[in-house]
């Protein structure tokens, strides 16, 4: 972010030493881990939840959808309403919301109450996601802001590759209520970690708040948001129904290995992006799009060869793992002093695209079958690549903008 040269003593010290405040950044990464795990876990314990709540598995699956809706519908208005709050207070409020929501989910015996608690969890996610990137940038020395964001975003693939399988195992062994209770414990522990390790920053001055349309008209913001919506839609369509796709090609018993391969390569992608994002955001964004497109092409044409399926999943993970870091960094750079507002818009669009991906994937499955998923990904990624390549001046710039701290908030 730009146009602000005054820094706290702690931030100046970090700049002088050119090091990252890892304790604080890992707390933020754990917050990212918690949001993704809370969102995705019902898919891993679906049969048990369905039985205990006395509803069908298809209905229980809407616990994921309602979470995304909670985030998508509240991120922008809540970001505006809480813009003046001190950042640490707001982050603690969001994490405490997870503790409450997951506790109610664990204790609930009634599906409507469970749906309400999941909506509240989604609202908490909207608060947290709108803060994370700005906080990471404010904590880090200017030359290392991209790496700081990568550290925080590592919580996403960690949740998907390790958290969800572990939660699914615990749910099978001890019951899904135990798993959600443990997530409440994690949220409470995270509150203590944030209090102890994460510095505080003021909120935005009231005169600094910008209308949504004004932020959207900022050069570079619209291309980043377009790429976010379409890229996330493409990924979600395939990822949500990957088990169905694998079943069709005779690899249904390999879903755990496939997801592990995807998770491991996603982690590698996060590391690569973190190492180079401060100088090569545009190159990495183009490469990520091409890698996922090549993976989809292999799955579309050569999925009858199991070895090539693993090659495709490896490329998919390498392409996708760093995408959250790339898009949130691009949005923050394009948004400038209104970076938090741009982040709130990105969070809203991201979750709307996730919800739409589940619905679109179901329609494709009913009418065209699972073989249509990789072809759909290819079609959607074509305009993504065009926009990324075209936005070389603003959005996915060939030359990174000069970054500084935002006035009043991270």
Image: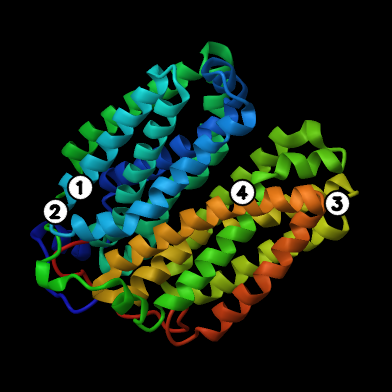
In this rendering, the answer to whether 181 lies above or below 278 is: above
Residue, disc 4: 358
Cβ–Cβ below 8 Å for labels 2 and 1?
Answer: yes
Could you classify mark 2 by the number of other residues whose Cα lies within 10 Å: few (under 14), some (14-19), or many (20 or more)? some
Residue 127 point in image, percent of width and height: 29, 49
Residue farthest to the top, as pictured = 174
Whole-angstrom CA distance, mark 2 to mark 4, is 34 Å
Residue 310 point in image, percent of width and height: 77, 47
Q: Residue at x 28, y 36 (%)?
A: 97
Could you classify mark 1 by the number of other residues whose Cα lies within 10 Å: few (under 14), some (14-19), or many (20 or more)? many
Residue 6 point in image, percent of width and height: 10, 71
Residue 237, label in figure = none
Residue 85, label in figure = 2
Residue, disc 3: 303
The disc, 2 or 4, on the residue closer to the chain's N-terminal end is 2
Residue 94 point in image, percent of width and height: 27, 42
Residue 90, label in figure = 1
Whole-angstrom CA distance, mark 4 to mark 1, is 30 Å
């Amino acid at each position: 972010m730009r146009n602000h040269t005054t820094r706290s003593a702690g931030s100046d010290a970090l700049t002088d030493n050119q090091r990252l405040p890892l304790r604080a950044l890992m707390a933020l990464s754990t917050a990212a881990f918690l949001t993704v795990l809370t969102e995705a876990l019902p898919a891993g314990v679906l049969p048990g939840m369905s039985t205990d709540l006395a509803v069908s598995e298809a209905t229980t699956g809407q616990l994921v959808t309602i979470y995304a809706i909670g985030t998508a519908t509240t991120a922008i208005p809540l970001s505006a309403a809480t813009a003046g709050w001190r950042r640490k207070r707001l982050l603690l409020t969001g994490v405490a919301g997870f503790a409450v929501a997951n506790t109610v989910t664990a204790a609930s015996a009634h599906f409507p109450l469970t749906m309400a608690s999941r909506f509240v969890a989604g609202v908490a996610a909207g608060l947290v996601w709108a803060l994370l990137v700005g906080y990471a940038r404010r904590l880090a020395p200017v030359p290392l802001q991209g790496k700081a964001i990568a550290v925080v975003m590592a919580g996403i693939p960690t949740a998907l590759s390790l958290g969800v399988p572990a939660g699914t195992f615990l749910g099978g062994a001890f019951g899904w209520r135990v798993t959600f209770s443990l997530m409440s414990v994690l949220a409470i522990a995270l509150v203590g970690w944030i209090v102890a390790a994460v510095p505080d920053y003021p909120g935005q001055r009231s005169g600094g708040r910008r209308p949504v349309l004004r932020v959207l008209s900022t050069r570079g913001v619209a291309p980043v948001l377009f790429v976010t919506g379409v890229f996330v839609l493409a990924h979600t369509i395939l990822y949500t129904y990957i088990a169905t796709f694998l079943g069709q090609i005779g690899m249904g018993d390999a879903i755990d290995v496939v997801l592990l391969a995807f998770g491991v390569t996603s982690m590698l992608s996060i590391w690569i992006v973190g190492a180079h994002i401060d100088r090569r955001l545009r190159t990495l964004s183009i490469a990520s799009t091409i890698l996922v497109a090549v993976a989809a092409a292999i799955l579309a044409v050569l999925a009858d060869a199991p070895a090539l399926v693993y090659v495709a999943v490896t490329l998919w993970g390498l392409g996708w793992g760093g995408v959250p870091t790339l898009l949130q960094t691009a949005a923050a750079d394009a948004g400038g002093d209104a970076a938090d507002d741009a982040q709130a818009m990105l969070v809203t669009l991201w979750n709307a695209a996730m919800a739409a991906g589940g619905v679109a994937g179901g329609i494709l499955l009913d009418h065209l079958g699972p073989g249509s998923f990789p072809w759909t990904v290819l079609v959607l990624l074509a305009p993504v690549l065009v926009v990324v390549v075209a936005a070389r001046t603003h959005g996915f710039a060939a030359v990174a903008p000069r970054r500084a701290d935002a006035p009043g908030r991270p």
